[in-house]
Image (cartoon, helix red, strand yellow):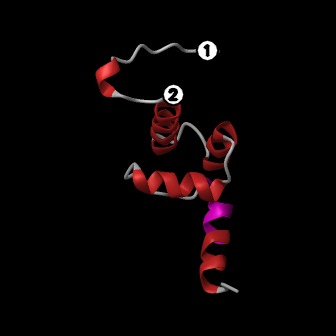
Amino acid sequence: MKIVIEVPDELNLKEDEIKIAALAKLYELGKISSGKAAKLLGISRIGFLDLLGKYKVQISPDTEEELFKDIENAYFVK
């Protein structure tokens, strides 16, 4: 599916900014995983999670399994 959005020139937005904002909101709403969003943007999952901070979106694990992995990684940082 392709969606076309007309944005007034005075907003001075680039296509990538709109795509990132849309994917950040979809992630926040629980409609897309961080991994899938990252893949659509062509960046790493960590890169996408970093972008979420810029958009003030709270990061939450996509699954219970990811939550446990995140906790394990937090305690066993190499």
Foreground of the two, 42 or 12: 12
Give coordinates of residue 12: x percent, y percent.
Answer: 36, 28
Magenta highlight: main SS? helix
Q: Residue at x 45, y 38 (%)?
A: 25
Location of mark 2 (residue): 15
Q: Residue at x 52, y 32 (%)?
A: 19
- Looking at the rendered structure, the secondary structure element under dot 2 is helix
Q: Along the line of sight, which residue is nearer the eye, 51 or 8?
A: 8
Residue 57 place in picture, x, y as percent: 41, 51
Closer to the N terminus: mark 2 or mark 1?
Answer: 1
Can you identify the residue that label 1 sits on? 2
Question: Residue 62 location in percent, x, y?
Answer: 60, 53
Q: Dot 1, how many residues are within 10 Å of its Cα: few (below 14), some (14-19), or many (20+)?
A: few
- Tell me which segment is drawn in magenta: 62-68
Looking at the picture, does residue 4 appear above or below residue 66? above
Say whether residue 33 is left or right of residue 13. right
Q: Nearer the viewer, mark 2 or mark 1?
A: 2
Instruction: Give the residue type at disc 2.
Output: Glu
Report the number of discs: 2
Q: Secondary structure at mark 1?
A: loop
Residue nearer the viewer, 20 or 77: 20
Which residue type does callout 1 highlight?
Answer: Lys
x then y, percent, for residue 47: 60, 55
Q: Is residue 54 left or right of residue 74?
A: left
Indicate the quadrant where residue 42 lies. top right
Q: CA distance from mark 2 to mark 1?
A: 13 Å
